[in-house]
Each structure stands twice: as C-alpha cells, then as structure tokens.
Amino acid sequence: MTETRKTPTIQDVARSANVSTATVSRALSSPDRVSESTRARVSEAIRVTGYTLNQAARSLRQRTAKTILVALPDIRNSFFSSILDAVEREATNRGYGVLVANLFLARSPAQRLQDYMLSNRADGLLLLDGSLDLSSLHSLVRPPNSVPLVVACEEIPNSGFHTVLTDNLSAGERATRHLIDLGHRQIAHLLGPEGNVVARDRLAGYTNALTQADLPVQQQWLFRGNFDMESGFAAAAHFMSLSVRPTAVFAANDESAIGFLSGLRQYGLTCPRDISMIGFDDLGVAAHYTPPLTTMRQPRELLGRMAAEMLIDILEDAEHRRGPMRIVLNSELIVRESTAHLPLRTSG
Amino acid sequence: MTETRKTPTIQDVARSANVSTATVSRALSSPDRVSESTRARVSEAIRVTGYTLNQAARSLRQRTAKTILVALPDIRNSFFSSILDAVEREATNRGYGVLVANLFLARSPAQRLQDYMLSNRADGLLLLDGSLDLSSLHSLVRPPNSVPLVVACEEIPNSGFHTVLTDNLSAGERATRHLIDLGHRQIAHLLGPEGNVVARDRLAGYTNALTQADLPVQQQWLFRGNFDMESGFAAAAHFMSLSVRPTAVFAANDESAIGFLSGLRQYGLTCPRDISMIGFDDLGVAAHYTPPLTTMRQPRELLGRMAAEMLIDILEDAEHRRGPMRIVLNSELIVRESTAHLPLRTSG
DNA sequence: CAATTGTGTGTAATCGATTGCACTACAGCG
DNA sequence: CGCTGTAGTGCAATCGATTACACACAATTG
C-alpha cells in the first residue's frame, strides 16, 4: 500500500496540523508571529510528514535563490580552491548555497555569468577573476540587470565594484626588500600574467623596493610568467641563458616559484645555495617544498570569508547605498629556507 | 522615465510577439512544434525584451533543478579540485549547474546533503567522499527519498551505489612492484586514513606485491597517515625512530609523500639518495617537486568527467533500471626521480 | 464530398510557498 | 458598556513557466 508517495508539501503539513498553509509558512519563517501551541503542532506535523521546503517554490515567490555564484579562473589552482573553501563555509553558515563556474577555457565567460545571474539561479556573484572583459561586466552590474557583485583577490580598476583583496603592492615591496636585506643586489622578478592587475601591483612593489634601495630595474630580469608551474619552469631556461644571472628571484606566486626551481634543478642549480627565491601566497605545499619556500602569505581563509560576508550582507541589505566598499588585507612575510644571505665568497 | 523595470517574463515576450505564453514556451523548449514564422517572431521578441528564463519557475513546474550537488571531503586538496574542475566542465556542457558542499569539518554532513537534495535545489548527488555514514546515506537513496547518486574516487562497499573509481588495489601493487624491481627489499607503506576504502585497497595492493615477491609484511613499516602533508611530515619522525629503516616508501598519496620527504629533510636525509619514494595521484606539483616525484597517476579529468556523465545520464533517463554501474579506470605508473635503484653499497 | 489526420496555437490549471488583506477574539481603557 | 488595539489565523492572489486539453484549420484519404 505504501506507494511511492510524493514529497510532502506545506499543504500536507497544514492538513496534519489542522491549520492553514499560511500558518505553517509563518511558523517556519517568523515563529514569533504564531502562538506557542500552534507552533508546537506544526513542528510535530513537520516531523510526522517528513516535510522539507521546496526551495524552487520559495525562490519563485521571493525572487531569491539563496545561492551565490562563485566564478573562478581555475579551480584546480590550490590558491583559489582554498578561497572557495572559505567562501563555501561562510555561505553555508548563512544558509546560502554555492554554485561554481570555472571560467578556465570557457568559451564566453561573461555570457555564462550573465545567464546564471539573470536566470534567477543565483542572487549574487563573487568574482575571483580579474581578467574578464569590463564592458561585459558592466552590462551585468548596471540597471536593469543590477547584479550584486563582489570582486575578490583580483581587482578591476576604476570599476567601482566592491572588492576584497590583499595589498599586493606593499607585499611585493616587502618581499623584494627581504631579498635586499639578505644582501642581494641582483634580483629578478618572475612576472604574473600580462594584464593582470594583481601581478602588476606586485611588479610595482618590486620596482619600488629596488628604486628605494638605489638598485636599477633591469628589463632583462623581468621573466615572463603566468602564475603556473609550467611558465616558471620555462623561465628557468631563460634564466640560464642570461650572461649576468641574478642571485635572487621574487616570483609573483608560489606555483611559478616552484616551477622555476624545478626548472633550475635541471641545470644542476640548487636553492638556496645558488639562488634565493621568494614566492607569494603560501600554498600548503610551500612549507613542505624542498627547500621550504619563503613566501608572502595571503590570508586566504580570511579573504574568502570576508568576501562572502560582504556579498551576503549586500544581498540581505536592500539599502546598500553606501558606495563601493574596498577591503585591503595585509600579507605576511613567511621566512623559510629558500632565501639565504648572499654568499660572502664573490661570484666573479 | 526609464524606471527600474522588472525582469521581463515570458508574458512580456508573448505580448511582444503577439502569441500566447504557451507558444513562447514551446518555441524555446521544442522549437519543432512551432511554425517557422512564429519561431522567428518569438526570437525577435526575446531579443527586444531582453528576456531570460526564470529557472526557479521552471524548476518548480518541472520538478527539476538542472543542478547537481558535488560533495567533497576537502576542496582545498588539489586532487579533489581537479576532479571538481572536470565535473563542472561536463555539467556545464550539458546545461547543469554545480553546487558544492565541502564536508570538511562540517557538523552533520549527511544531514546537509539530505537538506540540499530534498529541498529541490539539486537533482542528483555526486559524492567524492567515502567516509560518510552508510545508514544516513541509505535514507537518502531509498524510497521515498530516492536521490540519484554516484560515488566517485571513493567507494562505499556493499552499498550498490553507482561508482566510478580507479583500480587502487592493482595500482598499489604496481607501485610496490616498481620499488621491488629497483632492488628494494625493505619497503614501507605510508597509510591513508583508517577506514578509508581507497586507502585500504592501496594497502592491499602493497601487501600483495610484497607477498608475491616473498617479502614479509612488517607491521612497524606501516606508517600512520591521513592523506595530508602534516601526517606525512609526522611519519618521518616515526621513520627516524626505527632501528631498521626501510630503503623505500610507497605513500598512499602524493600529499603525504611530500610531507614525508619534507620531514626527512629535517634529519638531513635526501630522496632518492637515502630513500626512494613513490606517491599516488600525480598532483600537478609532483612533476615539479624536488626531486620530481614518481607516482601512480590517476586519470582525474577522465574520472570526473565520467562520473558527471553517469550521474546526468541517470537523471535524464527515467528508465534507469539497469542495476548499479561500476566503472574502474586504470592508473598509470609515472617514473620520475624520487625512486632509484638500491645503492650497491650496503648500508650495514 | 465526408471523414480523418495532423499541424499550430490558445486557454487555463498547475507546481509549492509566501504574503496582503480581512477577520475573530479578547484585553485594556475611558 | 462601547471603543480601540493587538495577537493569531485563514483566504486567496501571486511568483513565472510548463503542459494537458481543446480547438481551428488545412491536407489527405476513401
């Protein structure tokens, strides 16, 4: 006799508790508007029927999906997945679901985001990728499609978007200064992707630090990179081809630093004996690399959590007319073993 | 005058195209049931109005969210995030959204999954975590809450769930045999988490290989581990305390292998000079570690893609009465520099 | 020519929860 | 006693798309 019953609805609960559906709904969403005895009856009825809310129905009526969309340039990258982790945690705590859109190799990223947002699947967008076409984003953010948006980790200059990120410029400065303090005078920079704002700021920090120390910025010591290991690996070959080789490298992130060191290894060079290396991010593997990597630690968890908080705050506060918010977090220098004092023995 | 117009609905399109909403709906979902001229008028009207589908309304009516839920033990782990990447790609291609639930440190994981599934937010569940309580899962999968479920990477024994995974047992065998082939006779295994089926299979493979080579399985050479770097690091201390030290280690995964090597480094031991090490997974960093890590490569992308395919196939095929499916993929031995022939010089 | 089939479209019910409005009952007050 | 205010509840409209059913009309068939 127990046929495959359909999922119980609020109607079933109402019938079982001998109240109207309106009362059940209120007992759930604003319990203080319902008498205690009724509330108890409803709770019991919910238990008996095994009722669970149909989110689609609620979304339709309330025009709210209780879901945020997180757009990442590449989930596989441990840096982003850590942030996603923190975002997911915060969102879950506040009753939101997390949809992910991996933009890596996607055909038309902006279009995809637009589809998602406008189809009422997500209430807000958390963007971890600064490389999107600004104009297509504007069509999302401007009326009539005013999608709540927070940009994290990356930044879109002059966009006026809400942003949470770390102070890449001063962190780049700090990293470079660390090398200078160790006595290095010939310091290269392994660049991040061209056009990436974060990478640009780290470069600017590098340049500042050199300039402040009266060291020249040498064009040939800016190595092409792309934030990934392969590009770091390739840069090592370039490094070997130089007539005058730097004694230290500041890499725009840990992944490329690791790729670079792995590349150097092919030529028999060892860190920190032959070269000092500082990275950026403090990925989990940095502490366990050989050698353990000196790096600028970004507070990933904090960053993800704050970005999620900010977005959800915006979503839940209809009166968010307080102008663009911008939170800048500090990075921290983590000294490990990949950086060392310049050897006293002269190299020439 | 251009007030904040509401999002255009199918009604607006119908009015603009001078047809009924039914026709608009049909023009979208089954174009061949609509005459060509009407179809053109509707397309034009959609363009003019800027209409986008309200997914909530569709979900409510069709009882389908066009979304899958991916549950992971820990997104930060690069192994899982790679799989998520592949899953997301496949799901997107087939028009599905991807919700993520990170079960790491979650209070009551099974409850969370249940909530998600029963609230009509997701149509199916892709489980990448084998450590969940089986009984709570059964309440999900059995009627009346028959949630379509595919388990990937991990396995839940005797559950009868659909599964995609690699052949951990034979891969564990292969890995161990590789060490034996290099002349090693004293081979340790750095275990995965207790109770984890995948870890258990890799251990079984290790045991098999030893037995086949007439080597004894020594209890004290089974090092506790947890699939993460910290546990590998800790195991190194244990290793140092042994009176007779193995010459090679098969680690249950790359992360713990890296942690272990990093631990050994503290004691001045170097791989592969002092010890050979083989890992499992072939994480991106494996190729760029120092030394580059020999490992068993799991076809992560394929695995993720197939799991997503399987789940969506099930969702879209109402008649999926073909019994539990089980796909086993092969891992591949990737020989790099962390394993070496046993040195001819005797250690005693 | 009548009967039949098929194509294209419209009408209206439906999915399940929320919520504006109306109503009852009762307490408090002058 | 009559009036007002408030707490608690129910009725029914609503969100936006889908779809069973009905119907009009053209094409095909016997």
Image (tube, coloured by chain):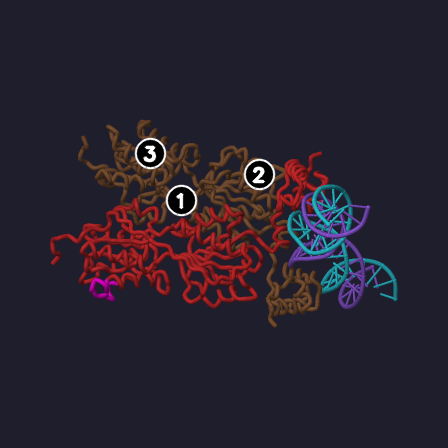
Chain colours: A red, B brown, C cyan, D purple
Q: Pointer 3: residues within 10 angstroms few (<14), some, or many (20+)?
A: many
- Mark seen at residue B177: none
Residue type indicated by callout 1: Gln
State the residue position of label 3: B189
Q: Nearer the viewer, mark 1 or mark 2?
A: 2
User: Where does residue B234 sit, x and y in percent of width and height?
Assistant: 31, 36
Number of disc labels: 3
> What kind of element bears circle 3?
strand
**Magenta-highlighted residues:** A210-221
- Between residue B77 and residue A282, name the one nearer to us: A282
Badges 1 and 2: C-beta atoms under 8 Å apart?
A: no
Q: Earlier in the sequence, mark 3 or mark 2?
A: 2
Quick check: B114 above or below C21?
above
- Mark seen at residue B140: 2
Q: Earlier in the sequence, mark 1 or mark 3?
A: 3
Q: Pointer 1: residues within 10 angstroms few (<14), some, or many (20+)?
A: many
Q: Pointer 2: residues within 10 angstroms few (<14), some, or many (20+)?
A: many
Q: CA distance from mark 1 to mark 3?
A: 19 Å
Quarter of the image for the N terminus of chain A: give it.
top right
Q: Nearer the viewer, mark 1 or mark 3?
A: 3
Left or right: A29 in relation to A233: right
Q: Nearer the viewer, mark 3 or mark 2?
A: 2
Q: Quadrant of residue B323?
A: top right
Q: Quadrant of residue A187?
A: bottom left
State the residue position of label 1: B298
